Amino acid sequence: MVSRMIYRGIWNEGQQAEGLSALKEDIGVRRLVQEGVLMTAAAFSWKDNVFLYYECVGEQIAPEALTGASIEYLSDWKGEAAPRKWIPMVDVFHFNEPAGYEHWLRKSPVERRVGRVAHLKREKMASYIYYHYQLQEERAFSGNKYEMIAMHENLLFGYQEFPLVIEDPVIPGRLSTKGTPVPWEDSRMDLHFQPWEDDGYLYFKPVEPVYTYYIGNMNET
């Protein structure tokens, strides 16, 4: 079994540089990938945000096992009995999902692992989830096998790999309906996003990678 995990953290004010350095230098995540506990692990940085994407082989691994000394530079998130350093982001869309270890192994080299972010209009969050779950579980059309979009509050974080791998899912869809708009443009995703005011991006924009590791290639950075 392979489980996909996405987490969000926020650096303490003025400690982003120290936190990123500690995160990049930590050997724990590399060891977990080398030992096959993780298939893929990647971290990305945007402003004072830091994102983790990783794939657990078998048992699900807590983010603290990957992040070592960098934890002391992260702010506490409240809202539960104990404060948390890492907030799990909710999987709101994927074209494909792991059907097993062999199914999820990369069959050809990955040239780029990319993180990207976007903000939804708050009044459009439910609509975004509705349309994307319908598309996902009706298997309306295929897309990037390894793409995943996750949400925390109205912030979306997306993970992608290039070159694209387009492949029909092995696991059957969970809906028997046929409600996905045809064409997809009729869903008016353009009305769901907050525009970026500073740099011209319409929806998602790329963020900086901190590291990317894969079980078959530990030379990635």
Image (tube, rainbow, N blue to C red):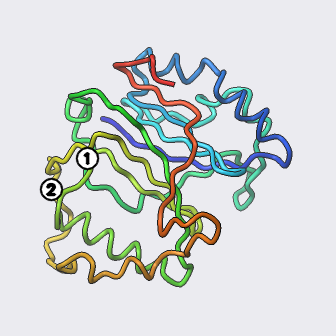
- Tell me, for residue 137, which label it has, or none: none
Q: Residue at x 37, y 29 (%)?
A: 57
The amino acid on which the numbered mark 2 sits, given as a three-letter code, is Pro
In percent of width and height, residue 97 lies at 27, 47
- Category of crowding for the residue at label 1, using alpha-carbon neighbours closer than 10 angstroms: few (below 14), some (14–19), many (at least 20): many
Question: Is 125 placed above or below 69 here?
Answer: below
Secondary structure, mark 1, is loop
CA separation in Å, label 2 and label 1? 14 Å
The mark nearer the N terminus, 2 or 1, is 1
The residue under label 2 is 172
| Residue shown at 86% from the left, 45% from the top | 14
- Name the residue: 21% across, 64% down: 174
In the displayed structure, 183 sits above or below 206; it is: below
Per the image, the residue denoted by label 1 is: 145
Between disc 2 and disc 1, the foreground one is: 1
Residue 164, position as x, y percentages in the image:
26, 44
The kind of secondary structure element at disc 2 is: loop
| Residue at horizontal 61 percent and vertical 50 percent from the top | 8
* Direction from residue 16 to residue 173 in the image, left or right: left
| Crowdedness near tag 2: few (<14), some (14–19) or many (≥20) residues, C-alpha within 10 Å | few
Which quadrant of the rendered structure holds the N terminus?
A: top left
Q: Is 137 positioned to the left or the right of 188 in the image?
A: left
